[in-house]
């Protein structure tokens, strides 16, 4: 029996070395290495969509994979693809990391640089385990399958710039375009998504915080299926419960949602916490909302600089939406783009609060008239960002959704480039360079100490 092995390593030199060593193993078939966690999950998802038998028997995860940290990636692969044996490669093979790797679902731990004997033994053991699982595994609705969806985070430069309204409209536009969409309120202390959509629900994201393996059934219990077609995961009603959602919980929740929905829109509010920083690090598209006034633009610049210092997001990987714009505004989008070093969406959102006041006060923004210039602009921006079309299709197909739900909207602009992968992530425990601050928890602690 031939053992198919898929290496996942962000470092090209490490990937070549691993592939070369795998090629020396008897009865093995090494696949082309994948460079990041997103590509790995998408590759496995496409293979699983055809048949479990199409999946590789063994996946090798290098400790320097990103943007999702190695241990979190091992857990997600083990959860979504239980017929695959995952082996972690790390320079640290101590008992603490070994225990953490086993808890995450790994079938083995190999020290770096790997030796032929150790690699052969771990691959053989993982392959035998995979073969046994495939003989007994029945296809179940509780197994995550299919390619991972896209994650879009929407943050505000400061309070009151229209962050939540923009996030809700992006999600509604995607749903109108026929995409299976989840809207997550990760403004954990002051979330207003439920108020904007007139929804009250007993569950929230805090109820998922202490769960290590979020199955589809558990996730479904926490998600509210709204009549708009959106799946809503709300912020806790009691703001103090927001502290229960740390960066690790956020990664688990976002990973579970990504595996069940085509698009996940996350309202991150205006505060940088470990949870929403982890979400922004995982996001395919990060949107920052501002208004064209001096205070808000300064806040946008401050926010972008903080993201860069904390290695959460680079300025050039951030899309900026200008809200409440008019042609008489002194500060125009081109100047904001120059100041913040971000990529400003080609369509600014006009200042027309009178169009919104009735539906905002009623808590039913989904009923906003299709003729609203604000709605048309935000749905056009959604098309520019590529939120209305499937991953492999051109993002400029946003006009289809606008025709379905917002007649008379302008033609969407070209798609903005999205971030291919996040900063190099390190292992959650025991491994990695102390100077790498890609994960959210440690940099928050260091920030307080400094």
Image (spheres, grey):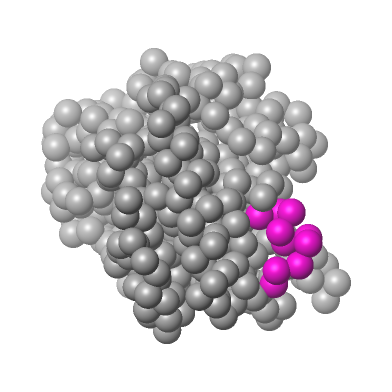
Q: Residue furthest right?
A: 449
Residue at 58%, 51% in the rendered image: 107
Q: Nearer the viewer, residue 402 or 259?
A: 259
Q: Position of residue 385 (x, y in %)?
A: 29, 54
Residue 135 location, quadrant: top left
Residue 384 found in image quarter:
bottom left
Q: Which residues are magenta?
A: 92-101
In the rendered view, tell whether residue 362 sits above or below residue 347: above
Q: Quadrant of the C terminus?
A: bottom right
Q: Is residue 212 visible?
A: yes
Q: How many marks?
A: 0
Rendered view: 391 above or below 259:
below
Does the magenta segment cover residue 93? yes
Give the main secondary structure of the magenta stretch.
Answer: helix
Q: Is residue 125 magenta?
A: no
- 13 vs 309, left or right, is left
**Percent position of residue 206, x then y:** 69, 33
Horizontal and vertical percent for residue 22?
A: 40, 71
Whether residue 338 is situated above or below residue 288 in the rendered picture:
below
* Residue located at (19% from left, 36% from top): 402
User: Which residue occupies 42% across, 81% down?
Assistant: 17
């Amino acid at each position: 029996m031939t053992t198919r092995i898929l290496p996942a390593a962000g470092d090209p030199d490490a990937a070549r070395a691993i592939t070369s060593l795998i090629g020396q193993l008897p009865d093995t078939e090494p696949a082309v290495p994948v460079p990041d966690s997103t590509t790995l999950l998408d590759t496995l998802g496409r293979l699983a969509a055809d048949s479990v038998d199409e999946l590789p028997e063994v996946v090798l995860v290098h400790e320097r994979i990103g943007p999702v940290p190695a241990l979190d990636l091992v857990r997600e692969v083990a959860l979504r693809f239980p017929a695959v044996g995952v082996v972690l490669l790390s320079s640290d093979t101590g008992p603490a990391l070994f225990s953490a790797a086993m808890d995450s679902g790994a079938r083995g731990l190999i020290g770096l640089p790997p030796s032929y004997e150790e690699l052969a033994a771990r691959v053989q053991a993982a392959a035998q385990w995979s073969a046994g699982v495939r003989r007994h595994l029945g296809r179940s609705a509780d197994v995550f399958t299919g390619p991972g969806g896209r994650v879009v985070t929407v943050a505000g430069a400061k309070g009151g710039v229209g962050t939540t309204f923009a996030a809700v409209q992006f999600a509604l536009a995607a749903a109108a375009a026929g995409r299976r969409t989840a809207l997550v309120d990760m403004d954990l202390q002051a979330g207003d998504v439920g108020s904007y959509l007139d929804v009250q629900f007993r569950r929230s994201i805090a109820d998922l915080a202490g769960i290590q393996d979020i199955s589809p059934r558990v996730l479904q219990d926490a998600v509210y299926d709204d009549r708009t077609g959106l799946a809503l995961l709300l912020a806790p009603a009691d703001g103090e419960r927001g502290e229960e959602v740390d960066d690790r919980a956020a990664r688990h929740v976002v990973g579970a949602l990504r595996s069940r929905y085509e698009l996940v829109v996350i309202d991150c509010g205006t505060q940088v916490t470990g949870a929403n920083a982890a979400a922004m690090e995982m996001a395919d598209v990060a949107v920052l909302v501002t208004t064209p006034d001096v205070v808000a633009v300064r806040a946008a610049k401050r926010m972008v600089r903080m993201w860069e210092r904390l290695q959460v997001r680079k300025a050039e990987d951030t899309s900026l939406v200008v809200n409440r714009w008019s042609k008489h505004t002194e500060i125009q989008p081109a100047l904001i783009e120059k100041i913040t070093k971000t990529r400003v969406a080609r369509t600014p959102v006009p200042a027309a609060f009178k169009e919104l006041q009735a539906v905002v006060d009623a808590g039913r923004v989904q009923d906003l008239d299709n003729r609203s210039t604000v709605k048309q602009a935000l749905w056009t921006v959604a098309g520019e960002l590529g939120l209305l079309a499937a991953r492999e299709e051109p993002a400029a197909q946003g006009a289809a959704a606008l025709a379905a739900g917002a007649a008379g909207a302008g033609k969407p602009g070209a798609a903005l480039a999205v971030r291919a992968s996040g900063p190099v992530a390190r292992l959650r425990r025991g491994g990695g360079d102390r100077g790498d601050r890609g994960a959210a928890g440690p940099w928050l602690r260091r920030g307080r100490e400094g």
